[in-house]
Amino acid sequence: MKKKILIIVSNANAIGPNNKRTGTFLPEVAHPYAEFNKAVYQIDFASLTGDTPYLDALNLADDPDNLQFLTGQGWADMQKAVKLADVDVSTYDAVFIPGGLAPMVDMPEAPLLKKVIAETYERNAVVAAVCHGPVSLLNVKLSDGTYMVSGKNIAAFTTEEEDNYARADVPFDLQTALTNQGAMVHPATPWSANSITDGNLVTGQNPASAKGVGEKIIAILENTKA
């Protein structure tokens, strides 16, 4: 049976005191999408509100996977993302949350999102996120009351990267917040590829890590190594 992937995207389009324009960072959705597509998976999109999501980093459209996403089925399907509340997430083999600054706006709390992630994780389906996407993992509590990230090996956008990117715009430091909930964050050299699998949790540090996150999700679902 064909594997099913649910990509959950932010609905935010501005962040911070200067209303910096933002959205889902193009390669962080396009590169994993390309991997899922090659694996012939069913790929669906959901957003928190069901409104049309936004894309950031359109200047990177000359990358082949990014261009294919924009001109092929990917962006067309993402624009029709359904409201998360209307999705039976229990039918999916994996949920994936791409980054961009947008998730820092609407995903730190988002009670339904936290419930979906906890339930997905506890039924041993794959939970995955990249760059600022791991903000979705914050405040997720498992049925025993512990934070999901506690004791987990995680890659996410680092303090060092944020200091040279959008420090003035983000409401808090992601690496610090994850660490405060017990995550073991493993930073690599800024902007280098760094993706980590810990059980059925897959995370990546930055845009360069998105392809690796996609590959690792597939490796788990196909019971192979990436």
Image: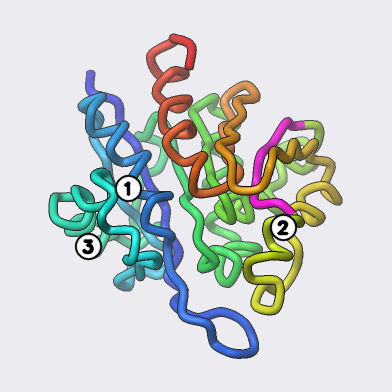
Q: Position of residue 3 (x, y in %)?
A: 29, 26
Residue at the spot of label 3: 80
- Compare marks 2 and 1 and give the one earlier in the sequence: 1
State the SS at label 1.
Answer: helix
Residue in view at x 32 percent, y 66 percent:
58
Q: Determine the CA span between mark 2 and mark 3.
A: 29 Å
What's under tag 3, amino acid-wise?
Answer: Lys
Q: Position of residue 125 (x, y in %)?
A: 49, 28
Picture disc at residue 30: 1
- Compare marks 2 and 3 and give the one earlier in the sequence: 3
Q: Determine the CA span between mark 1 and mark 3.
A: 16 Å
Residue 126 in sight in this render: yes
Q: Determine the CA span between mark 2 and mark 1.
A: 23 Å
Question: What residue span does the magenta drawing correspond to?
Answer: 152-158
Q: Crowding at label 2, few (<14), some or many (≥20) Cα neighbours within 10 Å?
A: many
Relative to residue 72, is residue 25 drawn left or right?
right
Q: Is residue 97 above or below residue 104?
A: above
Q: Residue lying at the far top in this picture: please name it.
A: 224
Residue at the spot of label 2: 174
Give the quarter of the image for residue 135: bottom right
State the SS at label 2.
Answer: helix
Main secondary structure along the magenta-highlighted residues: loop
Residue in view at x 50 percent, y 55 percent:
99
